[in-house]
Amino acid sequence: MMRSRRLSKDNVYYELKQKIIDSELKPNQAVNEENLAALLGVSRTPLREAIQRLENEDFLVRQPNGRLKVASITVKEVEEVFLVRSMLEGYIAKNAAKNATDKDIQKLTVILENIKQSFQLGDNQNFVSYGFEFHDYLSEMSELTVSGKVLNQLRDHALRYCRFVSLHGDWTRQADEEHGLILQMIADRNEDGAEKAMRDHILSSLSIALERIRGIEE
């Protein structure tokens, strides 16, 4: 008999969410408490709470018959998530440029090196991880608490789409170069330039995501 791990309810939630973000649990896959408990090696009590939280966040969907499934990946949702992100993150980049210290520029340069390296190695999942680290750090620099909170609610959905896209092909050189342009604008303390570069970057990521998702649907 498999021993249940004593995972805190938060850990159960994060682990389950991570499996959905990484497409280990595939879009539209039917799941139930029993198989999720076995997958995570946990008892059902902390699992129920994790399921409830993931339903509230639209990662899991309760169907009319009461059965659970992993949320699907839809063109409509991808468009909405990325469009809202482009507005929020543009504003964040603008404020990051205003607040940037030399130390911030150094830190972003290191992250950018990691982005470039993973791109050259064709390491798509790390490319996505470092990309999100770059965006998260700008959010910290911006000191915009409300925007940061709203962005956080979207962040993991966006991350799921980016990971999904990475499983079905490479990102483009353009995505790699766009981070460089954002950093250049921030290093120049060019607030409007940073805002525009960030918006353009997220909208071009959206077009790649849409192309892939449509391709998979076909």
Image: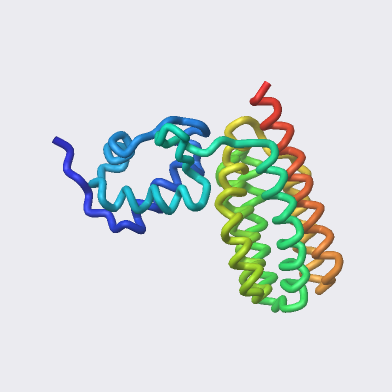
* Vertical position of residue 86 compared to residue 193: above or below: above
- Marks counted in the figure total 0
Q: Residue furthest left?
A: 1
Nearer to me, 142 or 109: 142
Nearer to me, 193 or 115: 193
114 lies left or right of 173: left
Q: Give me the residue at 70% from left, 29% from top.
A: 214
* Vertical position of residue 135 compared to residue 146: above or below: above
Q: Position of residue 14 (x, y in %)?
A: 41, 53
Task: Give the colour scheme shown.
Answer: rainbow
Nearer to me, 51 or 78: 51
82 lies left or right of 181: left
Q: Give me the residue at 34% from left, 53% from top.
A: 49
Q: Position of residue 104 (x, y in %)?
A: 66, 73
Q: Position of residue 175 (x, y in %)?
A: 74, 46
Quadrant of the rendered structure where residue 86 is? bottom right
Assign the C terminus to one quadrant of the image: top right
Quadrant of the rendered structure where residue 105 is? bottom right
Q: Residue furthest top?
A: 218
Q: Give me the residue at 50% from left, 37% from top.
A: 23
Assign the N terminus to one quadrant of the image: top left
Q: Give me the residue at 81% from left, 64% from top.
A: 195
Nearer to me, 8 or 134: 8
* Vertical position of residue 191 compared to residue 153: above or below: below
104 lies left or right of 67: right
Q: Position of residue 116 (x, y in %)?
A: 67, 49
Quadrant of the rendered structure where residue 113 is? bottom right
